[in-house]
Image (tube, rainbow, N blue to C red):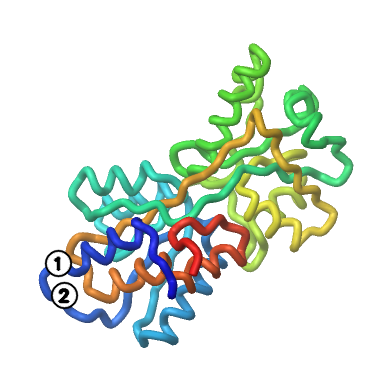
């Protein structure tokens, strides 16, 4: 018998305690771009099982949160950090905010770049190396990169200013250049030689390497390692199907799909 973790019980309690809700013709899901393939797969499975269509939009979590605040009609929001859903909860948009998976920061490197986990910090500080990141505040991946820079300062004084000054904010911003349709964003950035090393989620790095096999994926050393917590929130007056989708993401089926795409499953424990 499968055993549900406390985070799942939060959503079950919220659904049970909410007055009878209408069924929806479709559920609108806004989610972090790094979740694209994983949650598209979860949504397809959900549609087949429950017969309710899921309309999805993926992008930088900060920009999606702004769209929601500006009135976009969204039922479920899955962010690559905790703070964007927490801001929505504080404004009364919905609740609860629930951690549903984790990721890690990795580096993508051009094939000719000499970089390993052991030489990582010195390599990315090289004045001749182009270091790419996503855009802080708009995209949590950029915020996590800056956390890495803060950790680097503890390892070697002066590292924060060196890294933050040289970092090229190449993706995730409102005005960031987009890859052509069907082209992995990070593979495209690297193929266009916009960066020698790019800091992003490990799931993104592996997806880029699948599209451009010459790229290196470099694990970040433990003393600089940065984890990414992903959180869900459901709109307070959303239909029952929206709550069911959130629960499905937290279910064994949803969590196993996230694991298949390289995320850390945290919502369900054992059998």
Judge left or right: residue 132 versus residue 237: right
- Could one spot residue 220 in this view of the protein? yes
> Residues at badges 1 and 2 in contact (C-beta under 8 Å)?
yes
Vertical side of 250 occupied by 218: above or below: above
Q: Quadrant of residue 235?
A: bottom left
Mark 1 highlights which residue? 18
User: Where does residue 162 sit, x and y in percent of width and height?
Assistant: 66, 19
Q: Residue furthest top?
A: 157
Residue drawn at (60%, 26%) of the image: 149
- Could one spot residue 173 in this view of the protein? no
Q: Judge depth for marks 1 and 2 and give the one in front.
A: 1
Residue drawn at (30%, 44%) of the image: 86
User: Where does residue 216 sit, x and y in percent of width and height?
Assistant: 80, 48
Judge left or right: residue 239 versus residue 35: left
Mark 2 highlights which residue? 21
Q: Quadrant of residue 237?
A: bottom left
73, 180: nearer the viewer: 73
User: Where does residue 211 sit, x and y in percent of width and height?
Assistant: 75, 62
Helix or strand or loop: what does disc 1 sit on? loop
Helix or strand or loop: what does disc 2 sit on? loop
Vertical side of 51 occupied by 64: above or below: above
């Amino acid at each position: 018998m499968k055993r549900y973790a406390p985070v799942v019980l939060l959503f079950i309690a919220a659904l049970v305690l909410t007055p009878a809700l209408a069924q929806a013709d479709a559920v609108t899901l806004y989610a972090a771009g790094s979740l694209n393939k994983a949650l598209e797969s979860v949504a397809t499975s959900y549609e087949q099982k429950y017969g309710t269509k899921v309309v999805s939009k993926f992008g930088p979590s900060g920009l999606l949160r702004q769209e929601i605040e500006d009135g976009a009609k969204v039922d479920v929001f899955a962010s690559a950090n905790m703070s964007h859903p927490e801001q929505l909860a504080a404004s009364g948009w919905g609740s609860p905010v629930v951690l549903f998976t984790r990721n890690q920061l990795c580096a993508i490197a051009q094939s000719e770049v000499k970089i390993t986990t052991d030489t990582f910090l010195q390599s990315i500080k090289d004045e001749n190396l182009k270091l790419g990141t996503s855009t802080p505040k708009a995209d949590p991946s950029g915020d996590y990169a800056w956390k890495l820079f803060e950790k680097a300062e503890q390892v070697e004084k002066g590292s924060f200013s060196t890294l933050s000054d040289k970092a090229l904010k190449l993706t995730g911003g409102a005005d960031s250049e987009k890859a052509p349709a069907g082209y992995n964003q990070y593979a495209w950035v690297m193929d266009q030689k916009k960066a020698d090393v790019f800091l992003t989620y490990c799931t993104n790095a592996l997806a880029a390497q699948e599209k451009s096999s010459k790229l290196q994926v470099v694990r970040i050393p433990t003393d600089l390692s940065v984890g990414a917590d992903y959180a869900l929130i459901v709109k307070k007056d959303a239909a029952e199907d929206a709550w069911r989708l959130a629960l499905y993401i937290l279910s064994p089926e949803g969590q196993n799909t996230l694991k298949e795409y390289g995320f850390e499953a945290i919502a369900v424990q054992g059998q």
